[in-house]
Image (spheres, rainbow, N blue to C red):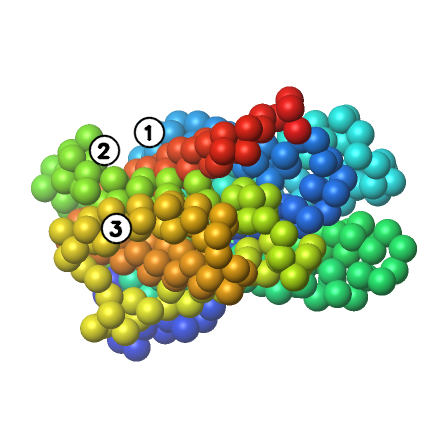
Amino acid sequence: MAEVYTRAPVRLEGKYGAMLVCWVLGNGCLFSWNSMLTIQDYYVALFPNYHPSRVLTLIYQPFALGTLAMLAYNEAKINTRKRNLFGYSLFFIATFIVLLLDLATSGKGWLGSFIGICVISGAFGVADAHVQGGMIGDLSFMLPEFLQSFLAGLAASGALTSSLRLITKAAFENSQDGLRKGAILFFAISTLFELLCVLLYAFVFPKLPIVKYYRAKAASEGSKTVASDLAAAGVYKQGPETKNEHDPQQVERLNNKELLLQNIDYAIDLFLIYALTLSIFPGFLSEDTGSHSLGSWYALVLITMYNVWDLIGRYIPLIKCLKLESRKGLMVVILLRSLFVPAFYFTAKYGDQGWMIMLTTLLGLSNGHLTVCVLTCAPKGYKGPEQNALGNLLVLFLLGGIFAGVTLDWLWLIGKGAGVAGC
């Protein structure tokens, strides 16, 4: 039966259910990609001459950045439901193809196999652009807790995949072809998880009362991107406030350029956060940290520590006194993170594994904390359509920072006198 939403829900029905679904959907946004990153020990063994930890990330990012640039430019005209469903479905299909490719090639490290993995990496980038920008834009006009839960889910995907990889690696460590068996099990689980996200977004999330309310409110403020999700939830109009929906005062909104100029510091913040983080993680941590007593487990332990503390950092802003909301304060702290570069360089050269683990912990903690602070503070004070557009623009700068970071990551090879062709 079709419903009409005329006022805010008295008890915010479905709030905690929506937070849980947002957390799972956040997981799904990066679960497949983090799976590919986390099994770098398998790909490094399979393709030792191709620097998979760096090459796959470098391929992923242009596809993500280019796709999101087009989507952000046309954000006001795009059907959010179709956008997000396409993204999650592409994650599911591409992850399943990774599994099929490994089975079809019997785990052989041929150039053709590596090219296939690279193509799938590009597909993950396209899917990420659809889902991450679409979801963050959509959640920006709802409760801040929804956005925080989604961002925590993004980090949780890294922590979950790392933990799962530790388990599968340990389970098959002493068996023949153990690395490959663990990787196959890993991607089978990832495929099922992405299918769960498709079903949750299609049939559960749109029908939660509080989600219907905020989407109806956004529609009353002039948003056209939520129409399909409202229809899927059985909402055909948004009540008395829509009587003035053609009034210029009702639907007038800032354009993308105006939004960006008003929030350029937040955009630069996100660019710098991820340029720094991705110049170190995962490439440097996977290949350039030397040999230590943990052996083949060392890189995996470092990646796991980063992911776990990135997740913890995204929950710290829930404690009001620890949430950094000052725009100048955010910029100062983010600029100070540049000290991580010399710290990692000298620790890799002269320090032991304990210091490296501590630095990796701080890198993840600061990345998660600052990301949530920026993305939850920026949308305050805007109308629903403006918050959606701003969310997309900020994610564009975030992905731009990631692309810059994975490009800068190659500079670590200069000190080793190495290049792709020479290694």
Outermost right residue:
176
What number of labels is visible?
3
Marks 1 and 2 in Cβ contact (< 8 Å): yes
Nearest the eye: 310 or 71: 310
Identify the mark at residue 244; answer none if there is no mark.
Answer: none
Would residue 391 appear left or right of 106 to someone viewing this image? left
Local SS, label 3:
helix
**Sooner in the amino-acid sequence: mark 3 or mark 1:** 1
Q: Residue furthest top?
A: 421
The residue depicted at 39 percent of the width and 61 percent of the height is 362
Q: Name the residue tied to disc 1.
A: 73
Q: Decide: marks 3, 2 in contact (CB < 8 A)?
A: no
Q: Secondary structure at mark 2?
A: helix
The residue indicated by pointer 2 is: 256
Amino acid carrying label 2: it is Asn
Residue 187 appears left or right of 302: right
The image position of residue 380, as x and y in percent, is 19, 55
Q: Secondary structure at mark 1?
A: helix
Q: CA distance from mark 1 to mark 2?
A: 8 Å
**Residue 205 visible somewhere in the drawing:** no
Image spot of residue 294 (x, y percent): 65, 61
User: Residue 423, percent across and down?
Assistant: 66, 29
Q: Which mark is residue 336?
A: 3
- Place residue 86 in its image quadrant: top right
Counting residues from the start of the chain, the first of labels 1 and 2 encountered is: 1
Q: Residue furthest bottom?
A: 11
Looking at this view, is 19 or 57 the one in front? 57
